[in-house]
Image: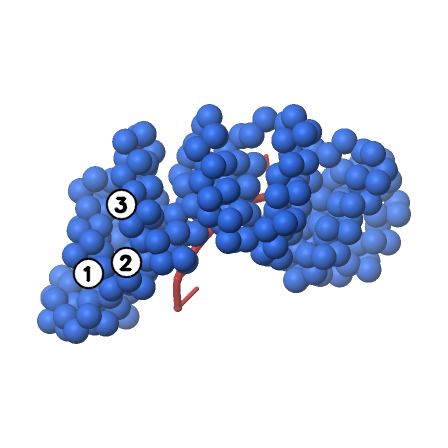
Amino acid sequence: DAIANALLDAYAKCGQMDEAWRVSELTKKDSLKSSSSMIIGYVQHGQSLMALGIYNEILAKNIPVDKVVFLSVIKACSTLGILRHAKEIHDHIILSGIDLDTRIGSSIVDMYSKCGGLGEAANVLNRLSVKDAFCWGPMIAGYAKHGQWDRAMHCLVEMHQKGIKPNDSIYCSVLTACNRAGAVPEGLTLFNSMKGKDDTLPTIQHFTSIVDLLCRSGLMEEARQLLTGCQKFSD
RNA sequence: CGGGAAGC
């Protein structure tokens, strides 16, 4: 039975959904495990509507949904980007009474963020009792995408206040936010604060971003100096 | 070994 589920999961991840279906006929017992595998499979291969279909089947059978199924459905909604669906799933999660740990919580923030519901995302984030960098990440990325770099920066400040260390990806998001806004001083300050505050070493991606920002603003010389200070990256 | 984020 464990083998059947592993096989189904493998087929789903390879996008062989017809084969996955065939295996699922054999594993009715672990329907939640096989369902979440199917949902993830559809999502990863651009068929999120099919994924929602599986979720609806579970609902129709009145089977209690567990965390992992919710997580996979959340992912489906994130890729669809339809706010109405996102709210619906969020309601289901609240009604189900499962506790919002950082994994489910960060996924809900991500879902709202990707559906353009930045206000909803912020609400969810605020109400999480435990937040890690994975919860702030999608919020910051959402602000970045919508040109609200000041809010993205504010999130960083809040993270520091709460003692949560931002990671590479988060700095990357905020830097690209500055990039879009042409916010040179803010971008530079941020870039320099990476080492000092969090002893996070800037990766090649951060260098690319800050150099891009400087060049777009016509500050070729500053960009050149940054690069010569870091010959390690030949790109 | 059914589960979470960014840029390019």
Instruction: Identify the residue shown where x is 65% and y is 36%.
Output: A91
Q: Please tell me which residue lies in front, A7 or A158.
A: A158
Question: Mark 3 = which residue?
Answer: A200
Question: Residue at point 83% right, 34% down?
Answer: A62
Q: Is residue A102 left or right of residue A203?
A: right
The tint chain B carries is red
- Image location of residue A197, percent across then percent down: 21, 40
Return the mark for residue A184.
1
Does the image show residue A68? no
Is residue A30 at least partly visible in the picture?
yes
Quadrant for residue B8, please give it: bottom left
Q: At label 3, which amino acid type do we have?
A: Thr
Give the distance between the C-alpha atoms of the residues marked 1 and 3, in whole angstroms: 20 Å
Q: Is residue A57 left or right of residue A156?
A: right
Q: Colour of chain A?
A: blue
| Dot 1 amino acid type | Val
Distance from disc 2 to disc 3, alpha carbons, whole Å, reads 19 Å
For label 3, the crowd category at 10 Å Cα-Cα, with few meaning under 14, some 14 to 19 and many 20 or more, is: some
Q: Earlier in the sequence, mark 1 or mark 3?
A: 1
In the picture shown, does residue A149 fall above or below A119? below
Q: Position of residue B4 (x, y in %)?
A: 54, 45
**Do marks 2 and 3 both belong to one polypeptide chain?**
yes
Picture layout, residue A158 above or below residue A57 = above
